[in-house]
Image: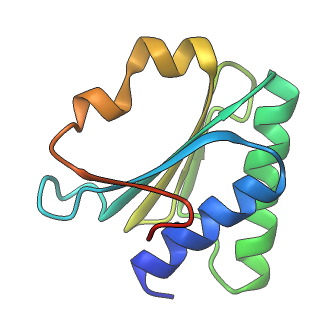
Amino acid sequence: MEPKELAKSAAQILSSKKAADIRILEVTDLTVLADYFVIATGTSSTHLKTLADEVEFVLKKQDVPPRHIEGKGGGSWLLLDYGAVVVHVLLQEAREFYSIERLWSDAKQYNEDEL
C-alpha cells in the first residue's frame, strides 16, 4: 500500500471509531522519519487503546502490520509506526501539550477526507 493510501486508510479507520480532530500531516520533504503523520484525539485511555487496536487489526487484515507500537501499556499517547506512516493517538491534554501540528507547522495538513 502506498504511503498516501495508508495514511488515508488509517484516518478513515480512526474516524469509524469516533476519533476526534483527525489530521494528516505530509512530512515527506521535512524529515526522514516518515512521509505522513496521522494524528487523532481519543476521549479516554480505553478509547485510545480501542482506536489503536482497530487501526492495527484492520491494516493487518490488509497485510500491513505495524513495525512498532509504543504506549500500549497505558498513558495518554499511543503511536503505531508503519514506516512511511506514523499514527499518533492522543488524549486532548497530551495533544495540546505536545502540539505535534505546531512542531511540524511547515507540513501540508489535511483532514481525513482531503487527502
In the rendered structure, the answer to whether residue 24 lies left or right of residue 64 reads left
Q: Quadrant of residue 34?
A: bottom left
Seen in the picture, residue 90 relative to 114 is either above or below; the reply is: above
In the rendered structure, the answer to whether residue 89 lies left or right of residue 32 reads right
Q: Nearer the viewer, residue 1 or 39?
A: 39
Q: Nearer the viewer, residue 50 or 11?
A: 11
Q: Position of residue 68 (x, y in %)?
A: 55, 54
The residue furthest front is 114
Q: Quadrant of residue 72?
A: top right
Seen in the picture, residue 54 relative to 115 is either above or below; the reply is: above
Q: Where is residue 33 in the image (x, y as percent from the top left)?
A: 26, 54
| Residue displayed at 62% across by 79% down | 64
| Residue displayed at 81% across by 22% down | 44
Seen in the picture, residue 112 relative to 115 is either above or below; the reply is: above
In the rendered structure, the answer to whether residue 62 lies left or right of residue 88 reads right
| Residue displayed at 75% across by 23% down | 74
Q: Where is residue 59 in the image (x, y as percent from the top left)?
A: 70, 74
- In the picture, the quarter occupied by the C terminus is bottom left
